[in-house]
Image: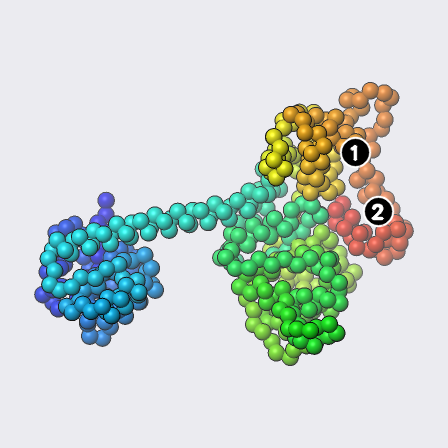
Amino acid sequence: MPRATILLAEDDTSVLQAIGDVLHEAGYEVLRAPAGREALLMLSDKVQLLITDLWMPGMDGLALLAETKQRQPLTEVILITGNATVPSAISAMKAGAFDYLTKPFTPPDLMDVVGRAMEHRRMREEITRWRAGEEADAAESQIRNLIGKSPSMEVVYDTIRRVATFKSTVLVTGESGTGKEMVVRAIHELSPRKNSPFIAINCAAVPSNLMESELFGHERGAFTGAASKTIGYFEAANHGTLFIDEVGELDVNLQAKLLRVLETGTITPVGSAKEKSIDVRVIAATNTDLQMAVDDKLFRPDLFYRLNVVRIDMPPLRERLEDIPLLVRDLLERLCVEHKLPMPDVEDKAIEAMQRYRWPGNVRELRNMLESVLILGQKPVITEVDLPESIRRTLTTADVSGPAIPNIDLDVAEKNTIERALRQTHGDRNRAAQLLNVSVRTLYRKMARYGLR
């Protein structure tokens, strides 16, 4: 077992030699320094204890103590003084010294305080390791909230861990209900910013005429109704993470202002001419195809490239049906705790029916369905009969009585209908949306869902 290292700083050569010999005979590795400056040069994470004289020319013991605590916080410090006074003792303890010795002292006195300091150091190391492990477990639990072992989800987990420690902007894409915000929270919790604010704003939920004020804040009197100065989401998230959800809904003029913030690290509140510096990591999410929006001149290409530094694509539930048994068990456990209900079993046929369903609402739809079945049924076993008709309808003709009916894939039918509309309009998405009687943005979402260009 390696010997513990003690750094000894003392300008009196005879005292330096005597104390060093006592510590060496006790089994410690001793580093000797004749002054504070030299001791500072010898300081490293290898040093577990510093013993220093209080009064030394150049750098005294209190200054050396302060520098040591700044550079190596776990290193314990014992001060030696020939003239202990209450003020000097108080100053030493306030600065972080473990204890102090008054000259003259005996070898047993020295070894007693050294032994206690070493034990204190060991306890602090254990607490530090325990806290670090607890923080790591808490951060990893954010990833564990994303349930699934499918290859597509393993890619998501790996990307989260890789990108978390950097400040780079991240774009999370995926259909509604796939868990995009959970991905963003996992990135924040695994990042160095985990103890700083996490602020989220949904662009689709804020009126466009208020969005600039919400993002950047405003001064008093900046517009009608602005009765007081208000900070925006960017300033509220300073030193932390700002999650901009549904970024594709941003007005084009605001897109230019968001780009400038990302490029310069400064914001200008509405009604102010003064810029404010901010340190915010931005993570955006969307369920629309931003590249398609760029092609149609509805989204700025420079902002898209700035947001799309790292991209995480959340797979829809229909593309990872093998995760449904895990998801069902996990969601039921959480729902049972939330509603104080006993945990039911789930029949294999019920799972099979869920795996045949297309889940247009993704994991969110699965959770809401299970909550309804759990509350309304309150049975020890969930069977396929307990499932909603829309899910039971996916059972094959071999599973139901009566005349056979053709299997109809509604997703394929919808995809084919959209393709016909696009062919009819020669790719004009505005005209295709009119033909289909949907909004252009809905058409974008459907095209992104089916991989249509």
Tell me how far mark 1 sits from mark 2, CA to CA.
Answer: 23 Å
**Residue 248 shows up from this direction:** no
- Establish if 343 lies above or below 148: above
**Residue 301 shows up from this direction:** yes
What percent of the width, then of the height, locates residue 324?
Answer: 65, 34
Q: Quadrant of residue 10?
A: bottom left
Q: Quadrant of the N terminus?
A: top left
What percent of the width, then of the height, locates residue 398?
Answer: 78, 21
What percent of the width, then of the height, locates residue 6?
Answer: 21, 57
Provide the secondary structure element on which disc 2 rests: helix
* Left or right of residue 153: residue 116: left
Q: Amino acid at mark 1?
A: Ser
Provide the secondary structure element on which disc 1 rests: helix
Q: Residue at x 69, y 43 (%)?
A: 364
Q: Residue at x 75, y 63 (%)?
A: 207
Dot 2 crowding, Cα within 10 Å, few <14, some 14–19, many 20+: many
Q: Residue at x 56, y 69 (%)?
A: 278
Mark linked to residue 290: none
Of 99 and 189, nearer the camera is 99
- Establish if 29 lies above or below 42: above
Dot 1 crowding, Cα within 10 Å, few <14, some 14–19, many 20+: few
What residue is pinned by disc 1?
A: 390
Of 220 and 49, nearer the camera is 220
What residue is pinned by disc 2?
A: 418
Q: Quadrant of residue 379?
A: top right
Q: Nearer the viewer, mark 1 or mark 2?
A: 1
